[in-house]
Amino acid sequence: MMNSLFLLLFILFGSAILSYIGHRISETLGNIIVVVGAFSASIWFFVGFETPAEFSYKIADFDALWSFSSYSWIFAALVSILSPLALLYSTSYMKGKERLGTFYFNFFLSILGMIGITMSQDFISLFIFWEIMTWSSYLIVIYLGKDVEKVGIKYMIFSAIGAYALLMGIVLINREVGSLLIEDAFAYFPQIQFSTQLLIGILLLIGFSIKSAMMPLHVWAPGAYSNSPMSYTAVFSGALSKMGIYGLGLVFIRLLSSGEFTLINEIFAWAGAITTLMATFYAIIQDDAKKLLAYSSIGQLGYIIVGVAIGTELSIMAAIYLAILHAAFKGNLFMAIGAVEKQTGSTDMTLVTGLIRKMPLTFFSTLVSIIALAAVPPLGGFVGKWMLYQSLLASEHFFLIIVIFTASTAAFLYSFKILYSLFLGQEEPEFKNIKEAPLPMLIPMILLSLFLIVTGTFPGILFEPIANGMKYLGFNDVNWNMSLLVNAWGDEVNLQHVSMYIGTIFIVAFIFISLKNRKRTRYVTTKDISTSGEIPLPHENLSFKLNFYKPFERAISPVMKKTMDSIYDEIGNGLNALFQFIRYIYSGNGQGYALYVIIFFVLLLLLKNQIFGL
Amino acid sequence: MVIADPIYYIVLPLLTAFLLPLFGKLYKPLIGIIPGFVFLFLAYMSVILMIDIRPDNPIITKIAGWTPPFGINLVFSSFSGFIASLISIMGFLIWAYSYKFKKVGFDDSLKYFILLLLVVTGSIGIVLTGDIFNLFVFLEITGISAYALTALYRGRDGAEAAFKFLLIGAFASSMILLAIILLYTQVGTLNMAEISVRMHEVDLKIKVLIFILFFVGFGIEAEMFPLNGWVPDAYSQAPGPIAAVFAGMVAKAGIYALVRIIYLMFDLEGAFHLLLIMGVITMIIAEVVALRQEALRRMLAYSSIGQMGLIMIAFSFNTEQGVFAAIFLMFNHAIIKSLLFLTTSFLVYNTKTKLISDLDGFGKKMPLVSLLFGLGAFAIVGLPPFSGFWSKLYVLIAAANQHMEVIIALILSVSVVEIIYYFKVISRLYFRKASEEIPIQKPSLNSSIVMIVLGLIIISVGVYPDLITGLIENATTSLLNKDLYIEKILPGLAEIIN
């Protein structure tokens, strides 16, 4: 009998190979394999593990152990839910694209990488899966062939820096602990010399935080998120970036638990908060919906980093809860934008407009996701933010609250922008014949929307596994209720009541407004205007979504002047110039090379006393 | 029972090389076929010998019945045997890749195969011999055949590259020869085991001088900076498979010789420091320069130098883990870099300018070759689950255990540079539209099979490194256990002298 963990990876790897072969034969066959493979892996994950499964082996003299901890199970579950939905969506979204076999092969491999990371209980397999995830996602990022050099290489450079920071931390742990099992590392870590502890901690944190796009290491993310096919970005932003959060949680709570590292916690919390703020600002000024969502993803991950870095019981709970929710609503949003892109051919918010009547279900799922994102009750985002603010208050991080609150409020601006520009507003004639997205794309979106609605009222569904997972992190009795929020000061929020009230108000208002405006609604285009002598040209873009937040942009422009991107570019250019200079050492001149030999020989003779200690 | 004796590594290819013109006169295709049988036999013999070899029972062959230290002996230990087997198996693969060798326009296959046989003889000879002068002779055989191979295409560039190679190679020869003469005047023997025993008699100053001469001489063969000016030209001008020979055999033999003399003969603490410093400089400069290359094969040549630098770093730790990592790296580098050069040979052949910028969209034109190139690139930068990852990991672990955090950081930073230039090529191969339709020379069946075999080795070692770690562990023990080496070759001598 094959080990159930091994079987899970086997299903994923088999699906990768089979979907490659299937897509070589015909697209339909390939798609069937993709969907069947994805769902069977997912079902096996949820059904196949009755008892805690373990798989230990030795590879190249390292002990390796696979098993889900209650904490990593949360992240594995997140991957297992989101990825089959994204793959189902993908079969329709990617229809007619070239080289689908390669695409799905890499897609499955990166799922395999993520599942592998969560099941690794030793650093060596964790790193292997981490790298598999990285390069397979790289191959998808550049799959569409857009900005291959700029975006792809940037993603790979930052991933490599992150991975190698991780690797360096791992070899140092190996030296100090003498084992690469994660549990051993936790157990022996406090006995290590403090400076080494610090070094290892920082290296691991850098490694993990690059994947979760923390400033100032985030610059790969906007391009990578918006350049990959949206069906993958849903997983990329929704699940893959959470692997970084998973690691940060391990490092902050279990490894750096001795209480001597509060400064690092503070630094990371602030980095997270600033990430949120800046990314939100950038999201607001974007005109491309994909880019907007990419920045918004970075911003949302910032909250989660804050939660993890603060490290109290409530903040961790908030962070994990937000991580799950973010996977759902951001996955959903990327899918919705992908649907818009698929149907209209563009995600430029100044061009695409008035889709609400054409794509009502897509609009609905966007709306739901955006409410969740903006943390408005009765959807789940509210619960997460509530807990996060509370934990910040309780741990007396008042300035952080200010920053985060500013960012949260500003997030309304871009949430509204995306909803308004794409779906509301005038209807342009060129989008007259747009149809609702096909069913395989709608089903995942609807399911995710329902998930968001349910968790808004009954967050306890998520609290149960979270509380379970937090036992692994050392928080043994986490209080939670199915749909009741309590805080440290004894206040209570009954979410069922909240949902009922808001739901009732919504329905009443909806009926009232529809009835009232039923007759008077007139559908117009942007050219349907009165002008005083200045007649617009036929192709002039009159959409008032151009410069939508101009005053706001002007207000924040001082802080946006110097971007991290340009700093990195300068570093890159400097290095390039230096490398070019070094290159001329190899002049191509044979006599020169001979001279090098002589000079080297003479130098050795001259320095021999120093080198050999004569 | 097959006769398996290390002497055949030298005799068979050497003899075949001399007789090959005669075979050619008999029947033309024999020129291509006969070396194949020789290489196949050597590869087969390697397997047979490697099965039984243990660190404590090296096979020692006395040539012409003269016992050491008077006669020349070959030592097939776990370490030298491992490298020799690697070279002979690579030799077979490269033969299989190129047995139909001919350049459009003129038929040079006779020269090609004679030189290929000689270069293999020389490289294996360097590895196996237990006699320092004999080592010099083999070094010359390797060198001269390598110069000729570089200039095989008779173009202007080839001739220039060969001339540079020759010029610098001449330095190497003369320095090593000088070192040997000095050494002989001091210890009165050429047998490496006996030199090792008698080394403590030598005055420290002269010892250091001899060491420096050896260091520079072998450093040239081992592609050490700043002695490696010949490398980029030679690698990029020689015929495709020969670049693989240089990376997989000649450079390996050079580093082997360097390591052998450092570990066996010179007990100088400074030698390891020097090796470390030079390894770091070699690695950094080469990888940085590789980033700025426009021609694919030059890029690979610099990357090759960078890898040699890494191998030097690993050897310089002078610990079991370091040596283990270094030998693993040598194995990986031989396999992976050969695969890269063999695939590149096809890629470059189908472009006009041999530049990286000409490779747009080749993933579609030459799917197999591009895939294998990508595999090689993934492996060489050390991405799991390919074999290059493990050797890099072991180097880092060895460095960590030596408390060399800075070295770790340097190796990893350079790896980032490596990733950049390899991934630039991959993204061109796969994610750019092809500029124009030009007729493509498809790889022949035999070369495809060879490249696939190399690819499979990379994957299987990557997924299951224990395939190879046992052999490497034995090789490590064998290299580090110097007393055993001496005792096996010259029983009782150490006691007599001490």
Image: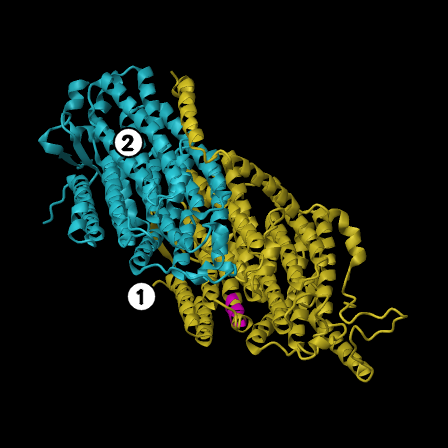
Instruction: Point out the stretch of residues depicted in magenta.
Output: A83-89
Whether A468 is drawn above or below A561: the answer is below
Residue A394: x %, y % from top left = 67, 50
Query: On the picture, is B299 further left or further right than A359?
Result: left
Res B411 seen here: yes
* A84 falls in the magenta region: yes
Q: What secondary structure do most residues of the magenta stretch adopt? A: helix
Whether B126 is drawn above or below A499: the answer is above
In front here: B99 or B205?
Answer: B99
Residue B148: x %, y % from top left = 31, 39
Q: Type of residue at label 1?
A: Met
Query: On the picture, is B442 further left or further right than B180?
Result: right
Residue A259: x %, y % from top left = 57, 41
In the picture, the disc for residue A438 is none
* B477 falls in the magenta region: no
In the picture, the disc for residue B260 is 2
Image quarter of residue A547: bottom right
Callouts 2 and 1 close, C-beta under 8 Å = no
Q: Type of residue at label 2?
A: Arg
In the picture, the disc for residue A1 is 1
SS class, disc 2: helix
Please report the residue visible at 74 percent of the width from the left and 61 percent of the height from the top.
Answer: A413
Residue A230: x %, y % from top left = 58, 65
The Cα–Cα distance between marks 2 and 1, rounded to whole angstroms, is 49 Å
Chain represented in yellow? A
Please report the residue visible at 31 percent of the width from the left and 21 percent of the height from the top.
Answer: B210
Q: Label 1 marks which chain's residue?
A: A
Please report the residue visible at 76 percent of the width from the left and 67 percent of the height from the top.
Answer: A541
